[in-house]
Amino acid sequence: MKNKFDTATFAGGCFWCTEAIYKRLKGVESVTPGYTGGRLENPSYDTVCQGNTDHAEAIQIEFNPLIISFEKLLDIFWHTHNPTTLNQQGNDIGTQYRSEIFYHNGSQKDIAEKSKKELEKTRIYKDPIVTKISQLTKFYPAESYHINYYDKNKSAPYCNFIIEPKIQKLLKEYSQDVKDEYKDA
């Protein structure tokens, strides 16, 4: 019997970072970097980087909910980027780097809103959480050179200084959720 996969779509800054994190998780079948949340049809990296399309760099995750839950994906989302900075992650600045959860159905919306409220109650972040929760309208896959960017460019400065610390945090805090082939990499 074939497993039914679910889909989640998150924007948490640079999609090179978020793709590298989520592809390492047990139960994640695929992660596609792309663009969503804007008004321009068929956006490109160049147009999105100009900051006037309203699209965010995002990832679309195909996952097996029998292995990893949407709640766990959200937990990792909240803890592997900064959900308190508006339109910015580190030195990446602009609306395309915003923090946003794009729900696919009412259940995901309810779970995301509950998760955000619970996180706010913990006060682990001193600043307010600015992450938006919006209905997914259309997701546009990014150009092929963005796929597996981190794994293909580990020696690049951005990968070393920005993405690698996030991977190390994932390995430290969520090691039980990481696929075996990534634990010693």
Image (spheres, rainbow, N blue to C red):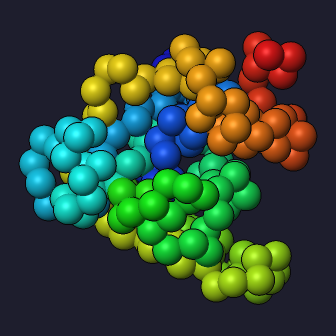
Image-based side of 178 in relation to 71, left or right: right
Is residue 181 shown left or right of residue 36? right
Furthest residue in direction left, as rendered: 41
Residue at horizontal 86 percent and vertical 16 percent from the top: 184
Q: Position of residue 114 (x, y in %)?
A: 61, 76
Is 178 on the left-hand or right-hand side of 104? right
Check the picture and name the quadrant holding the C terminus.
Answer: top right
Can I make out residue 25 in this image?
no
| Image-based side of 51 in relation to 43, left or right | right
Residue 98 location (% of width, % of height): 45, 63
Residue at the image point whose x is 53% and y is 78% from the top: 130
Up the image or down, 48 lies above or below 150; here it is below
Judging depth in this view, the residue of 180 and 12 nearest the camera is: 12
Q: Nearer the viewer, residue 22 or 8?
A: 22
Residue 99 in the image, given as x and y percentages of width and height: 50, 64
The residue lying toward the viewer, choosing from 14 and 41, is 14
Q: Is residue 181 above or below residue 140?
A: above
Q: Is residue 91 above or below residue 132?
A: above
